[in-house]
Structure formats: structure tokens, C-alpha cells
Amino acid sequence: MRSFLKRYHPVRVKGGRLNYQYVMAGFRSAVRLGIIGRERYQYWKLVFWSLFRRPRLFPLAITLSIYGFHFRKVFARHEKLLRKAARHEDRIARAAAVRKSGIHTA
């Protein structure tokens, strides 16, 4: 992500207003990703890098970190469902093979 942020040049706009939701999202991401999460080292490394090297991109860095967390959670959930479906298909295939071979188990 840092390589993207190094090369990214955002359009200059007038300073945005700091509102409550943004502050709370930043606080929650610091707790969830920076303290609780396994990726805390990478999170703080990105936070401090963006603060000192590209301060204008700090909000984008936090936003992309939150997106990454979301995608990891969604992927893990779908991966779990896909593995469960694959096991179910394997059981069906084995049962069909047993029926076809004529071997019965009690």
C-alpha cells in the first residue's frame, strides 16, 4: 500500500471539516487494527509513515487500512463457507462411489 501512496498525487482541495464520524472511525481503527489485530505492526508502520512522509494522504491511508480489514473479514467468512460446501460435495461423491461399487457399510 505504501508504494501506491508514494506514487499517488491527489487533487488539491480546500481543507475538509473534521467531523465526529471521522474521528470515531480513526479511533476505532486504531483500537481494532493497531491494538487488537494481528496486523498491528504494519498498521502503525503505515500510520507513522503517512504522517511523516505524506501527511496529506493520512486519511486515505487509514481508509485503505479499514478497507483491507473489511476485505480480510469477508474473505475469511466466504472461505469458511466454501470449505464447508467442498466437504459436503466430497461426502456426496464418496457416497455415490460406494453405491456404484455395490459395497454397503452398516
Image: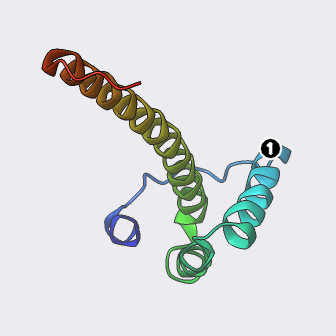
Please determine whether, in this image, residue 99 is positioned above or below residue 71: above
Q: Please tell me which residue lies in front, 99 or 63.
A: 99
Please determine whether, in this image, residue 23 is positioned above or below residue 40: above
Please determine whether, in this image, residue 101 is positioned above or below residue 9: above
Q: Is residue 88 left or right of residue 56?
A: left
Q: What colouring method underlies this structural image?
A: rainbow
In percent of the image, x 54 and y 62: which residue is there?
Answer: 61
- Provide residue 98's location: percent of width, then percent of height: 23, 23
Q: Please tell me which residue lies in front, 31 or 56.
A: 31
Q: Please tell me which residue lies in front, 21 or 45.
A: 45
How many marks the image carries: the answer is 1
In percent of the image, x 75 and y 51: which residue is there?
Answer: 25
Q: Quadrant of residue 103?
A: top left
- Provide residue 73's location: percent of width, then percent of height: 56, 46
- Provide residue 78's location: percent of width, then percent of height: 46, 36
- Provide residue 47's location: percent of width, then percent of height: 60, 74
Quadrant where the N terminus lies? bottom left
Residue at image mark 1: 21
Q: Quadrant of residue 52?
A: bottom right
Q: Please tell me which residue lies in front, 58 or 93.
A: 93
Q: Is residue 93 left or right of residue 73?
A: left
Residue lying at the far left of the rendered structure: 101
Quadrant where the C terminus lies? top left
SS label for mark 1: helix
Please state which amino acid type lies under the numbered disc 1. Answer: Gln
Please determine whether, in this image, residue 28 is positioned above or below residue 38: above
In percent of the image, x 66 and y 66: which residue is there?
Answer: 37
Local packing at callout 1 (Cα closer than 10 Å; few below 14, some 14-19, many 20+) is few
